[in-house]
Image (spheres, grey):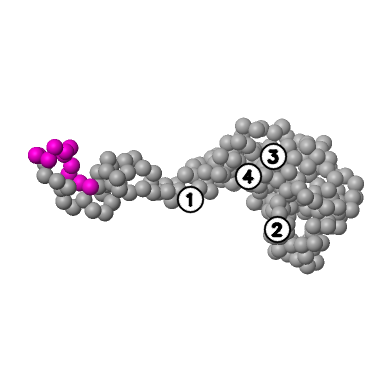
């Protein structure tokens, strides 16, 4: 059973807590790499474009007569071999995203959660709901937890506007819910601060065998 440090909302230690079996899995770096490439590919805008010879302006008349000039034959200034002409086989707008099985995505998240837990980078906090969106109070609490100065993901069960505002001016601190964890943020942040309420939700959302929602519904019938 993997354990993690338990703290209160101010960062004071309250002992240790047992993490769900989800955090004891064996990390799979190959799956994490595959899921990261899939996520980054989906972020690409794909707005790169070049003009073909049919889109370049000009070229309505033949530059010079076919014979008798001593120069090579030319039919249009829009030819790809001319400066300012069209581009042959240039990039066109397209979508770079592709489909990755949900089971692979879930396994990647489980692998990263297990890696952080087994490396002692997971901190469980009893309550992380600040009374007011004060950045200095949150920074002081994180520093007391030992997270100050490091990149950290704060995981809550439900969206918390006050916490998000308080963390907005802290460089390297990202607030996510248990359902919106993603590979890129888990990889680029060393520490993982999870609320007690979100800990149970993480086990419920990411702790299964990775079946799709449709398969799960069919199994209940």
Whole-percent x, y for residue 58 in the image: 23, 53
Q: Which residues are magenta?
A: 67-77
Compared to 58, does 67 lie above or below? Answer: above
Q: Residue at x 81, y 53 (%)?
A: 142
| Callout 4 crowding tier (Cα within 10 Å): few <14, some 14–19, many ≥20 | some
Q: Badge 3 is on which residue?
A: 112
Whole-percent x, y for residue 201 in the image: 72, 50
Q: Residue at x 25, y 47 (%)?
A: 78
Tell me the SS state at disc 1.
loop
Q: Badge 4 is on which residue?
A: 184
Label 2 and label 4: CA atoms lie apart by 20 Å
| Callout 3 crowding tier (Cα within 10 Å): few <14, some 14–19, many ≥20 | many
Name which quarter of the figure residue 119 lies in. Answer: top right
Taking depth in this image into account, of 45 and 9 the one nearest to the observer is 45
Say the numbered circle drawn on residue 45. 1
Label 1 and label 2: CA atoms lie apart by 29 Å
Whole-percent x, y for residue 162 in the image: 73, 64
**Can you tell which of label 1 and label 3 is closer to the viewer?**
1
Q: Earlier in the sequence, mark 1 or mark 2?
A: 1
């Amino acid at each position: 059973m993997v354990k993690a440090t338990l703290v209160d909302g101010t960062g004071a230690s309250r002992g240790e807590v047992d993490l769900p079996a989800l955090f004891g899995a064996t990390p799979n770096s190959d799956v994490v790499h595959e899921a990261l490439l899939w996520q980054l590919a989906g972020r690409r805008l794909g707005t790169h474009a070049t003009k073909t010879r049919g889109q370049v302006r000009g070229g309505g008349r033949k530059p010079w007569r076919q014979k008798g000039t001593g120069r090579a034959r030319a039919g249009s200034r829009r030819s790809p071999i001319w400066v300012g002409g069209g581009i042959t086989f240039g990039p066109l707008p397209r979508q770079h995203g592709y489909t990755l099985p949900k089971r692979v995505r879930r396994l990647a998240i489980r692998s990263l959660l297990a890696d952080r837990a087994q490396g002692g980078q997971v901190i469980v906090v009893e309550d992380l709901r600040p009374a007011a969106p004060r950045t200095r109070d949150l920074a002081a609490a994180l520093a007391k937890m030992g997270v100050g100065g490091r990149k950290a993901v704060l995981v809550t069960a439900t969206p918390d506007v006050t916490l998000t505002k308080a963390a907005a001016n802290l460089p390297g601190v990202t607030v996510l819910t248990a359902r919106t964890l993603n590979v890129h943020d888990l990889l680029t942040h060393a520490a993982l601060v999870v609320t007690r309420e979100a800990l149970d939700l993480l086990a419920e959302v990411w702790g299964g065998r990775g079946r799709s929602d449709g398969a799960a519904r069919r199994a209940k019938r």
